[in-house]
Image (cartoon, grey):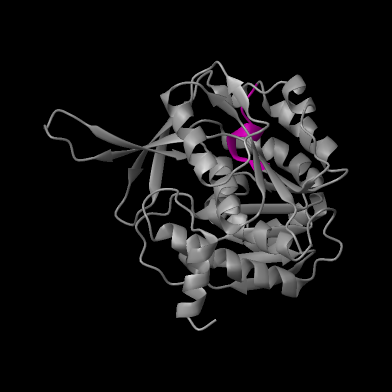
């Protein structure tokens, strides 16, 4: 079976990591292409899914870096907009566990300036799933345009959303106010346990899943770092353990998990509608694959998801 296309919409962000400088009064930054949706598109393409990225790419030095990175990974940029605005920059500080805290430089940057005319030109006839989330769904003026695009796309494709809450840029209340609407659009809702705490503070994961099922999301997956993932399909739940790995950092791990989940479902022909054929065993298999993809991403620096060949080598080494 040939894999159908997954279209990803959202931002591409320059992730800058501090490194030792030659002088005490200098700061050296190593810049890597990142941004949740861009990371997901790259991971999908590297896994072998035809991945198209709807992005507004600046012509500045960072935008050129993004384009080269995406194209080298096999991502289709035929519908990317050549934007006049500058790129978004995020400066990451890593703690002793490799967890990243970001500060953002995102005022009036290219990623949030979507217009209805730009997205009206996108042909979804070959798309099985549209994935989006993160800041593209909450940063104006483009957020409302993105939501309208999802509502139109839902008539022909599965919809996947990752809220990826960024409280330094957008107050969590903005996400909370829109989440029920996103669940009404979404077939798949993937979020981290940190997102859960920001969206529904103090709420047990099982109760949160039921709230989001009631709002419309059929499949809810909550990733829990070293604890693995919990998935809920119409209220039926499973727990999938994480794959042990030597963690360099966790940047992009959740995005890689999402890509692994969608790739696995797409490879089995389960995307393209309202997931009516999806069963809990399918979800368990997809999550087990996704935690392997996330583990390999954690084992290297920055948002650098694995290629399909690396997954195959890992499976061979593990005797799978």
Instruction: Identify which residue, 231 or 210, lies in the foreground.
Output: 231
Residue 124 is a magenta residue: no
Pinpoint residue 188: horizontal percent, then vertical percent.
73, 54
Q: Residue furthest left?
A: 23
Observer-nearest residue: 200 or 25?
Answer: 25
Q: What is the span of residues highlighted in magenta in the rendered image?
A: 132-140
Side (left or right) of 281 relative to 106:
right
Q: List x then y, in percent, for residue 10.
A: 62, 35
Any magenta on residue 136? Answer: yes
At which x and y percent is residue 153?
82, 39
Q: Residue sitting at 57 percent across and 34 percent down?
A: 11
Q: Nearer the viewer, residue 128 or 240?
A: 128
Q: Is residue 123 visible?
A: yes
Residue 93 screen position, x and y as percent: 33, 42
The quarter of the picture where residue 269 lies is bottom right
Residue drawn 59% across the image and 42% down it: 37
Q: Is residue 199 left or right of residue 273?
A: left
| Image height of 190 relative to 148, above or below | below
Q: How many marks?
A: 0
Residue 242 in view: no
Q: Is residue 316 above or below residue 45?
A: below
Q: Quick check: 244 above or below 199?
A: below
Single out the residue that lies furthest toward the top. Answer: 84
Q: Quadrant of the C terminus?
A: bottom right
Q: Name the residue at 72% across, 49% down.
A: 5
């Amino acid at each position: 079976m040939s894999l159908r296309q997954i279209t990803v919409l959202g931002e591409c962000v320059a992730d800058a990591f501090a490194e030792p400088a030659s002088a005490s009064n200098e700061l050296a930054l190593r810049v890597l292409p990142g941004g949740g949706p861009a990371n997901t598109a790259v991971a999908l393409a590297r896994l072998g899914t035809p991945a198209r990225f709807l992005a507004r790419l600046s012509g500045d030095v960072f935008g050129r870096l993004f384009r080269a990175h995406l194209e080298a990974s096999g991502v289709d940029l035929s519908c990317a907009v050549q934007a006049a605005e500058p790129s978004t920059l995020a400066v990451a500080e890593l703690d002793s566990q490799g967890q990243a805290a970001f500060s953002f430089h995102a005022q009036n940057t290219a990623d949030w300036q979507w217009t209805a005319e730009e997205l009206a030109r996108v042909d979804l006839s070959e798309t099985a799933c549209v994935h989006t989330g993160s800041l593209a769904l909450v940063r104006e003026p483009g957020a409302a345009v993105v939501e309208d695009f999802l509502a139109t796309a839902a008539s022909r494709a599965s919809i996947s959303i990752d809220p990826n809450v960024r409280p330094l840029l957008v107050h969590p209340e903005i996400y909370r106010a829109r989440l029920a609407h996103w669940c009404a659009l979404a077939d798949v809702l993937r979020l981290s346990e940190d997102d859960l705490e920001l969206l529904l503070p103090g709420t047990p994961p099982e109760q949160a899943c039921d709230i989001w099922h009631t709002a419309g999301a059929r499949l809810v997956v909550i990733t829990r770092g070293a604890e693995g993932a919990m998935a809920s399909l119409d209220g039926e739940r499973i727990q999938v353990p994480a794959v042990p790995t030597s963690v360099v950092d966790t940047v992009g791990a959740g995005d890689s998990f999402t890509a692994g989940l969608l790739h696995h479902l797409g490879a089995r022909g389960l995307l393209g509608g309202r997931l009516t054929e999806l069963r809990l065993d399918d979800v368990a298999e997809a999550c087990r694959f996704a935690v392997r993809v996330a583990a390999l991403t954690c084992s290297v620096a920055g948002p650098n998801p694995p290629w399909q060949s690396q997954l195959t080598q890992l499976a061979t080494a593990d005797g799978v």
